[in-house]
Amino acid sequence: MKTPLVEMDGDEMTRVLWKIIKDELIIPYVDLKTEYYDLGLKHRDETDDQVTIDSAEATKKYGVAVKCATITPNAARVEEYDLKEMWKSPNGTIRAILDGTVFRAPIQVKGIEPCVKNWKKPITLARHAYGDVYKNVEIRVPGAGKAELVFKNADGTEIRQTIQEFDGPGVIQGIHNKDNSIISFAKSCFNYALDTKQDLWFATKDTISKTYDHRFKDIFSEVYEEYKTRFEEAGLEYFYTLIDDAVARVMKTEGGFIWACKNYDGDVMSDMVSSACGSLAMMTSVLVSPAGVYEYEAAHGTVQRHYYKYLKGEETSTNSVATIFAWTGALRKRGELDGIDELCSFADKLEKATLSTIESGKMTKDLALITSLENVTVLNSEEFIRAIREKLDEM
């Protein structure tokens, strides 16, 4: 390697797997260079979340990052980890700084067929990387009173709307988005569709959200005019539909297209697609910025339940495929940008070894429960990674 990767360590069981993957599958084969940032929850708390910001800025500097899954704390986590405050989602912070779009797609492997039988090709979820509930402001309403939405113009004038006349306790949530972020999102989606030669869907709920969601719809329509000729020449289709209609339609397709969603919708729908295709641990995720910066991660969380078993000394069988593919994605992109063909080849080889291990009948428990293969061997978390190393050494 010439240029380092930005390495963002994480939390709980994925943090445990992170080290094993590096020790068994990366360091023995790659002259690994990384700029390391500990995004574990305790360290984020100790640095007042500055480490998250620093890691994002480093990603802008070096161009490629690989990230472990991290905890986004709720009230229970604040108490569990004795946090100073309920810190924002680190993924949301990084996405906002990079102004990128998250593209997620299932990892297909023989023996793990989608629950939706007509899905023949991967469905790529394009998730907007800014705003919505991930940068929200919330108020716990203590009792009766009036809630208002107020915008103060730079010239001092105000726009004011009544949200609700409360007659008792409740909650208020304020979310926002920005035109330039939505434009970047749209352009990323149209570019990615052309690059991967896939049709593009976009879905919101503009019939209910007649200003917020409708703004997304209008911007996509405006930006599409810049791409319309290229789409037609490539034989590709772009269309807009309501999010509930998209959910109904997607179940009846063969796949092989990009489904663009707002931030929250993309978060939820990517988990649905990945689970339907086998496992939450079988999905790639890459954040791509308009400036050509890439951050690779697993699409799933920190596997809290397995971590608590691990702390008790109990055996776990945690699927590490998505985390391995985060590393291979980052290494391949680093190799492409730096002109190191051997690094790209190694990433390809490691992915092939991972899938070949599963296809040979060796897999973690989550896959063994849904595979169509017979006489499979269920391996624990570390055994599975070591089986991949054995396959890698044979290739």
Image (spheres, rainbow, N blue to C red):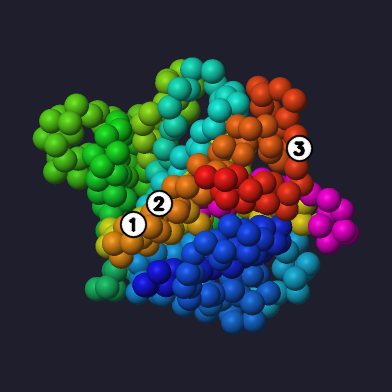
Residue beneath label 2, please? 345
Residue occupying the far front of the picture: 394
Query: Mark 3 near mark 1, Cβ–Cβ under 8 Å?
Result: no
Task: State which quadrant residue 268 falls in.
Answer: top right
Q: Is residue 323 left or right of residue 222?
A: right
What's the amino acid at mark 1? Asp
Residue nearer the viewer, 64 or 188: 64
The residues bearing labels 3 and 1 have C-alpha atoms spaced at a distance of 35 Å
User: Is the residue 247 above or below the residue 267 in the image?
Assistant: above
Query: Mark 2 near mark 1, Cβ–Cβ under 8 Å?
Result: yes
Residue 358 in the magenta stretch? The answer is no
Task: Assign the N terminus to one quadrant of the image.
Answer: bottom left
The residues bearing labels 2 and 3 have C-alpha atoms spaced at a distance of 29 Å
Q: Residues within 10 Å of mark 3 (few under 14, many from 20)?
A: some
Residue 321 in the magenta stretch? The answer is yes
Instruction: Tell me which segment is drawn in magenta.
Output: 309-326
From this viewpoint, is residue 131 visible?
no
What's the amino acid at mark 2? Ser
Q: Residues within 10 Å of mark 1 (few under 14, many from 20)?
A: few
Q: Residue at point 37% right, 62% down?
A: 334
x and y, in percent, of residue 320 in the image: 63, 49
Helix, strand or loop for disc 2: helix
